Image: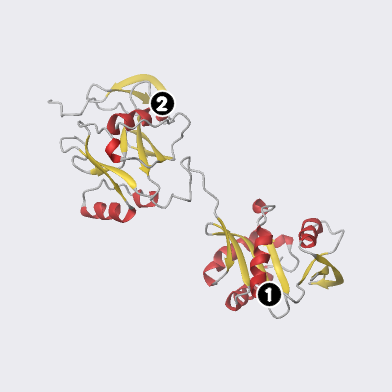
């Protein structure tokens, strides 16, 4: 069989078990993979600060996906390569770009019929004029944004990775190791936040008297909807997930319910929600809140927080049969 330009059929791969353990055997690229044996491939996706993806057009004489546009660099790990070394080698060979992958891990791994495919994400503003393209592999390169990539896929000139559009949503949401970047925001909640709000309420319901039963939760949901319609429901969110809630009364200048997700406490989130609430209440009239009485096992954190905002103890009473105390903000 005549070897196509750029196709190194003598290339040797390490073989792996289904559990991704090396067998100690090697495999010639041109041969059919043995049953139950697999090899390792890598893909590297390079994004710039404009959230554009560096894409390459494969040479028309390539065996696989000829003349199609592809992501930045890709290939198979050769014998002796680990995943990171294969990624670094492929980028250097195809683009002439030397990126250190020694401390990098794949953003994710996909299984395919012949093995394991590790995907790496790099963020780097690359000057295309500085690249040295491997003529046996790469015809040309360019930067493309999400809209252009999706259009190219629809035109049938881009390899149809099913997940490619999602890559563009990673910027600002995940780091290159696949860890989610926490983006904390606060705002006034609308009906569109209700599902996440009530999902959060299930997490903290046992911390608040009167939310123990399903009937009570139904009543609480109705109350939340009313506050959302009145513009008196404040939320804190990590991305789209609500991790803090505050209901208040404009007329009474009263905090009805304030809660923060256990994993997000001590980050100033409650204070931020109160500050946002105050933009609706204004100043000049004292704000009140009912919380646990001093000595209650659940009192310490809440009372310390309100004390830090200038609240002082007021009248003791009962709420839903539970002993509470009114705290009043000093003006």
Residue 192, x across and y down, in percent: 52, 69
Quarter residue 33 falls in: top left
Whether residue 273 is situated above or below residue 83 in the rendered picture: below
Residue placed farthest to the bottom in the image? 251
Q: Is residue 29 left or right of residue 80?
A: left
Q: Is residue 70 left or right of residue 109?
A: left
Query: Which residue corresponds to mark 1?
Result: 282
Q: Are marks 2 and 1 in contact (CB under 8 Å)?
A: no
Q: Please indicate, yes or no, whether residue 294 appears anywhere in the rendered image.
A: yes
Q: Residue at x 35, y 19 (%)?
A: 25
Residue 232, x across and y down, in percent: 63, 74
Quarter residue 206 falls in: bottom right
Q: CA distance from mark 2 to mark 1?
A: 61 Å
Q: Residue at x 29, y 35 (%)?
A: 130
Q: Nearer the viewer, residue 234 or 274?
A: 274
Query: Which residue corresponds to mark 2?
Result: 82
Whether residue 107 is situated above or below residue 182 in the rendered picture: above
Give the class, few, some or many, for how many residues have Cα within 10 Å of label 1's Cα (few <14, many ≥20).
few
Secondary structure, mark 1, is loop
Secondary structure, mark 2, is loop
Residue placed farthest to the left in the image? 2
Q: Residue at x 87, y 58 (%)?
A: 295
Give the class, few, some or many, for how many residues have Cα within 10 Å of label 2's Cα (few <14, many ≥20).
few
Q: Is residue 306 left or right of residue 106?
A: right
Residue 325, x across and y down, in percent: 83, 68
Q: Quadrant of the N terminus?
A: top left
Quarter residue 301 falls in: bottom right
Q: Nearer the viewer, residue 304 or 325?
A: 304
Whether residue 141 is situated above or below residue 151 in the rendered picture: above
Q: Quadrant of the C terminus?
A: bottom right
């Amino acid at each position: 069989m005549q070897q196509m330009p750029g196709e190194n059929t003598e290339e040797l791969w390490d073989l792996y078990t289904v559990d991704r353990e090396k067998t100690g055997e090697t495999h010639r690229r041109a041969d059919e993979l043995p049953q139950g044996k697999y090899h390792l491939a890598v893909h590297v996706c390079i994004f710039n600060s404009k959230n554009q993806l560096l894409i390459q057009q494969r040479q028309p004489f390539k065996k696989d996906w000829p003349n199609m546009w592809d992501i930045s660099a890709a290939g198979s790990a050769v014998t002796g390569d680990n995943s990171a070394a294969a990624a670094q080698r492929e980028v250097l060979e195809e683009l002439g770009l030397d990126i250190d992958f020694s401390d990098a891990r794949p953003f994710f791994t996909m299984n395919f019929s012949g093995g394991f495919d590790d995907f790496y994400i790099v963020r780097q503003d690359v000057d295309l004029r500085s690249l040295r393209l491997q003529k046996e592999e790469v015809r040309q390169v360019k930067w493309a944004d999400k809209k252009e990539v999706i259009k190219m896929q629809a035109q049938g000139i881009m390899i149809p990775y099913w997940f490619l559009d999602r890559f563009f949503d990673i910027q600002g949401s995940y780091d290159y190791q696949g860890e989610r970047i926490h983006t904390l925001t606060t705002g006034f909640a609308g009906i569109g936040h209700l599902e996440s709000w009530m999902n959060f309420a299930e997490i903290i319901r046992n911390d608040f008297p009167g939310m123990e039963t399903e009937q009570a939760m139904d009543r609480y949901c109705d109350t939340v909807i009313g506050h959302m319609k009145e513009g008196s429901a404040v939320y804190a969110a990590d991305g789209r997930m609500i991790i803090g809630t505050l209901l208040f009364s404009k007329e009474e200048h009263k905090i009805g319910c304030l809660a923060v997700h256990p994993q997000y406490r001590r980050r100033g989130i409650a204070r931020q929600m109160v500050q946002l609430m105050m933009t609706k209440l204004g100043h000049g009239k004292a704000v009140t809140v009912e919380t646990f009485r001093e000595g209650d096992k659940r009192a310490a954190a809440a009372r310390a927080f309100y004390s830090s905002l200038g609240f002082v103890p007021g009248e003791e009473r009962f709420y839903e049969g539970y002993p509470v105390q009114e705290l009043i903000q000093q003006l």
